Amino acid sequence: MPEEKRKVDMDKIVSLCKRRGFIFPSSEIYGGLNSCWDYGPLGVELKRNVRDAWWRAVVQERDDVVGIDASIMMHPQAWVASGHVEGFSDPLVECKNCHLRWRADQLSGEKCPDCDGELTEPKMFNLMFKTFMGPVEDNANVVYLRPETAQGIFVNFENVRSTMRKKLPFGIAQIGKSFRNEITTGNFIFRTREFEQMEIEYFVKPDTDDEWFNYWVKERFNWYLKLGIKKENLRLRRHGKEELAHYAKDCYDIEYLFPMGWSELEGVANRGDFDLAQHAKHSGKGLDYFDEETNERYVPYVIEPSAGVDRSVLAFLVDSYDEDIAEGETRVVLRLHPALAPIKVAVLPLSRNEKLVPMAREVYTEVHRHFMTQYDDAQSIGRRYRRQDEAGTPFCVTIDFQSLEDKQVTIRERDGMAQIRLPLRDLVSTLQAKLSGEAFTTQPTWSAKAVGTRED
């Protein structure tokens, strides 16, 4: 059967991201740089909200996980111990005609996909970016940009355990940039050479690893559902024995139905005791654990949920993208979960009339103390609503001429475009309740119809 694909076209997502300031091509005025992207004003807020939601779920709301922020550059022996120097490679082939290079394991034929030319024999290509530390560029000063954040956690296992006085099971979480010199990139921000990871290394007693592995698979799958991802667009795929990494005892991929088909969103692996044992062996430092309850000493097993920030951003964008009809025209709307929406509230005076502006500015000043807020008075109110819909803004607050008399404002909700009116003194508390999940129609003091805010 052909690979299932989403109805949402990736070109629409890319166009929306450029149009509304989510994501731009890197160095665009110079023609761009392949697979590199810059997050714009809305994109950086969305990305920050994804990171914050993850951190809140795995660190803030738990008492068994703490965080660190390890250096991007590590001692080169750390990468020898982890196996990256010797084994972190992909098979590379080059077209003898056009000289384009491809991953051999991703080609379906023996010819160049671009020009049908003859390909060279595969050669192994290490994916780590190599650089030099200090003024002399020689082998003694070689360092690497980390290809994953996990190793920074493993080498700090004992530091964290002793300073935080942690007992097993406990985890260490980290969010940070990683770098892989990928041979083949593409699909927008799905696969890039510079990316951001959200990883947990959860340390457990060896005979409890299967239980914790299953726990974290379920926990991480449900995180996406809680933030609005449709269940039919998520699935679990267990790795076959032949595709398990050399360190892995077991692994599941949480896959999402991207526009190009089902692809990995997050991996959850049972890494066994490989990492701590390897670093202990190569460093000469003990990384075992003394269990006071059983009077045993052992090397902990590790369960690793590893997610990509950029892939998560892409999944939330794709899943929230929708088109419907409003006022006889197609409306593009991002139905983002309020916790992820870059702008929570937009303040919109009905017009630029000099009588409305002072009150509108006062409302904006008060609201943006509590929420990420945008003030917009350009073009018709209908056009401004459309802009906020495309940005994923959950609520718009409109100030009209009646507001000057009755000190009430109108809140317009993004998804159903319902409009309700309430006293200005209740605005912030009401927005807080609605952004926290309270149903939009549960406030009895609102009137059923707003005044002067027709979407034209």
Image (cartoon, helix red, strand yellow):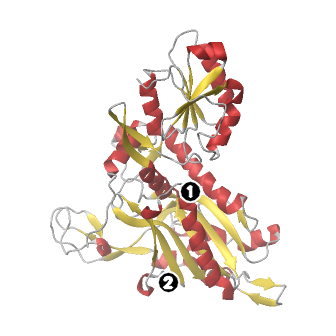
238 sits left or right of 305 in the view = left
Q: Nearer the viewer, residue 293 or 182?
A: 293
Within-10-Å neighbours for mark 2: few <14, some 14–19, many 20+: few
Q: Earlier in the sequence, mark 2 or mark 1?
A: 1
Q: Label 1 is placed on what type of residue?
A: Pro
The C terminus lies in quadrant: top left
- Residue contact at pointers 2 and 1, CB within 8 angstroms: no
Within-10-Å neighbours for mark 1: few <14, some 14–19, many 20+: few
**How many marks on residues?**
2
* Residue 234, horizontal then vertical, whole percent: 45, 65
Q: Nearer the viewer, residue 143 or 137?
A: 143
* Vertical relation: 175 (above or below) 120: above
The N terminus lies in quadrant: bottom left
Report the Cα–Cα distance between label 2 and label 1.
36 Å
* Vertical relation: 377 (above or below) 226: above
* Residue 77, horizontal then vertical, whole percent: 59, 74
Dot 1 falls on a residue whose secondary structure is loop
Say if residue 41 shows up in the picture: yes
Q: Which residue is mark 2?
A: 246
- Identified at 61% across, 72% down, the residue is 216
Dot 2 falls on a residue whose secondary structure is loop
Q: Which one is closest to the eye, mark 2 or mark 1?
A: 2
Task: Choose top left, top right, bottom left or bottom right for residue 364.
Answer: top right
- Identified at 57% across, 58% down, the residue is 226
Q: Which residue is mark 1?
A: 135
276 sits left or right of 87 in the view = right
